[in-house]
Image (tube, rainbow, N blue to C red):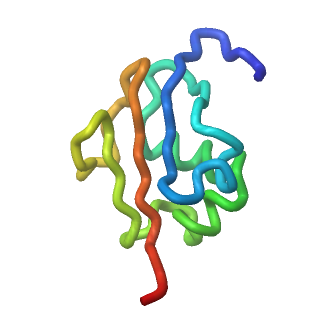
Amino acid sequence: MVSLPGGVRVKVLVLEVEKELMEGTDMEIPAGIYFDEFVDLACRKYPRFKSQLCPEGKLAPYARVFLNGKALTDTGVKIPPGSELVFFPAIHGG
């Protein structure tokens, strides 16, 4: 993995399909990054993440996200170092 100057580690889980969407769960991100900037970064780096969670270039309204165990309702928050982000993509079927 390429180390970012001043970067921090966070754990990112995309339930049910995380390895397929993001090649694992650990990700290094720039320190002080905001959640909406993280989504943009993840969409550029992981095409399947984009197609499943932000097909229109921003987080889809059906996606649910938890930051450190709490439902994320404000996408303008900074992601603290060592955080855990959990994404619940839409689940189809019956």
Q: Position of residue 58 (x, y in %)?
A: 49, 61
Q: Position of residue 29 (x, y in %)?
A: 57, 27
Quadrant placement of the N terminus:
top right
Q: Nearer the viewer, residue 76 or 83?
A: 83
Q: Nearer the viewer, residue 2 or 37?
A: 2
Number of marks present in the image shown: 0
Farthest residue in the front direction? 94
| In the rendered image, the vertical position of residue 59 relative to residue 94, given as above or below | above
Farthest residue in the bottom direction? 94
**Left or right of 68 on screen, residue 17:** right
**Left or right of 41 on screen, residue 15:** left
Residue at the (65%, 48%) spot, across then down: 19
| In the rendered image, the vertical position of residue 33 relative to residue 39, given as above or below | above
**Left or right of 93 on screen, residue 19:** right
Residue at the (65%, 40%) spot, across then down: 24
Q: Position of residue 73 (x, y in %)?
A: 24, 52
Residue at the (37%, 70%) spot, across then down: 61
Q: Quadrant of residue 3?
A: top right
Farthest residue in the right direction? 2
Q: Quadrant of residue 5?
A: top right
Residue at the (45%, 75%) spot, across then down: 91
Quadrant placement of the C terminus:
bottom left
Q: Quadrant of residue 57?
A: bottom right
| In the rendered image, the vertical position of residue 9 relative to residue 57, given as above or below | above
Farthest residue in the top direction? 6
